[in-house]
Image (cartoon, coloured by chain):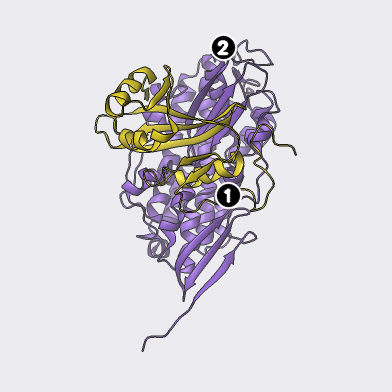
Amino acid sequence: MTKLFVGTELAKVIELNHPDSVADHSDAAVIVHTGQIHKVLAFLKQADDLDFQVLSALTAVDYIQHFEVIYHLLSMRRNTSCVIKVRLPGREELAIPSVTDLWRGAELQEREIWDLMGIKFEDHPNMKRILLWEGFPGHPLRKDFIR
Amino acid sequence: MAIKTEPITINMGPQHPSTHGVFRLRVTFDGEVVVDVEPVFGYLHRGTEKLAEERTYVQIVTLTDRLDYTASMSNNLAYVRSVEKLGGIEVPERARYLRVICAELQRIASHFISIGFMLQELGAFGTPLMYCFRERERILDLFEMLCGARITLSYMRPGGLIQDAPEDFWPALSILMESMPEYIDDLEGLVTSNEIVLARTRDVGIISPELAVNGSVTGPMLRASGVQWDLRKANPYEVYDRLEFDVPIGYQGDTYDRYLVRVQEMRESLRIIEQCVEQIPEGPIQSEAPFFVRPPVGDVYDSIEAPKGELGFYLVSDGGISPYRCKIRAPSFINLTLLKDMLVGWKLADLVVIFGSTDVVLGEVDR
């Protein structure tokens, strides 16, 4: 059975190595500050006792007050998974560091989030729309998108 | 004397017989050799995730049929499992077994399509594809007995299934189970040691295990690279923990291994179905789940091993009758991440075969 790494325990491990990077945590997930997200994810990937070598899913949710970007990480060797979240306040000019240098698997998924949610990923090698065409008005998965 | 060549960019698709739907590749060639590839998606984008936000949890089952339209049962299963996890809905034992039988039949049908089209792209025009389709038809006939539909099945519901299998289903299934191993032997006899197939697919389009893991590749493509990872084993859902089966892996990660892994998986699926038929208990097939499912506020991610790889649904509930957000982690889409790494350096004729071996369905890529 794939074991979910309990958020409260993971938060302690992250705090130990990267102080002041955890904004909030629950049993299910750890919420990390936007500025520290790349450092924290690199740590989760490289630390030998965590070993999250796979980014199984990357997604975003529009909560109107803020956006949430959600990383589902997986360690095949230890058969554990964990959920890391980032909160982005506001609605305009949203940006977050890309993780394509850690996981190639993020390439298409980050482009999809930019296309449908309008969150830019900095340092992505090819930050273009993917499912819709260039010049499409707005980002359709946002809650305020009007057809 | 070296001949000076100039790179030339050509379009493959969206209308091209070998692209499994409406997929476009902008390929740059140096002579006959691929130097750059840019996939262009979105011709089949229907906004499934947005549509899901305006439908009830039960209605969304019909949307999932249209993702990977060669494996509707697996899509149904992945979705209803997420809803059940989010809403804490119990599923009766008999329904669990029937779900596994359906999912494994669907895996065989999907792999038939994958292998048939790959052979078609190798230049074996028509005949092998029709051999595969003939057997797939027989599986679709079984699905028709279960729910009346052949492709867009919508057989599963949160909490169970729409109806029990009719009495005729079980004898029909056992006839299929008896003849299928022989048929797979026939297919292997024609293909597995065929000299042309070997020459065209051995060592072509290799993905190393490290790259495959880093690129979030899942399913037969990952296992062909030699990584032993199958969610049915690693994170057993439904009744897989009670069933005995092996996870076939490849060694090279080339096009041939991807074919081989799929053929072996079909045999394992038959083993699974056999055990399910023996073990399936009598009883109800639907728990008392309300028609308007109202899961508590929260979010959940659940994934299954679909024929193409890890198919996951990330659902966010605000307590209402429809999900606040429904993200689909589509395996074909993410498996395309490494397309460029597989193709660069190979010739135009190999490009078609390598792309065929990735087993992409555009309904799932574009959603």
Q: Is residue B49 visible?
A: yes
Q: Residue furthest top?
A: B288
- Find the distance from the CA under tag 2 to the CA under tag 1: 47 Å
Give percent across and percent down for residue B182.
46, 44
Nearest to the eye among marks 2 and 1: give it.
1
Choose between A89 and B145: the one closer to the eye: A89
Give percent across and percent down for residue A116.
61, 41
Q: Chain of mark 2?
A: B
- Residue B98: which quarter of the image? top right
Give percent across and percent down for residue B227.
33, 42
Colour of chain B, in one word, is purple
- Residue B65: which quarter of the image? top right
Local packing at callout 2 (Cα closer than 10 Å; few below 14, some 14-19, many 20+) is few
Give percent across and percent down for residue A91.
60, 35
* Contact between labelled residues 1 and 2, with CB atoms less than 8 Å apart: no
In the drawing, does residue A103 fall left or right of residue B71? left
Local packing at callout 1 (Cα closer than 10 Å; few below 14, some 14-19, many 20+) is many
Residue behind mark 1: A130
Q: Which mark is residue A140?
A: none
Colour of chain A, in one word, is yellow
Q: Quadrant of the C terminus of chain A?
A: top right
How many marks can you see? Answer: 2
Residue behind mark 2: B283
Q: In the picture shown, does residue A80 fall above or below B17?
A: above
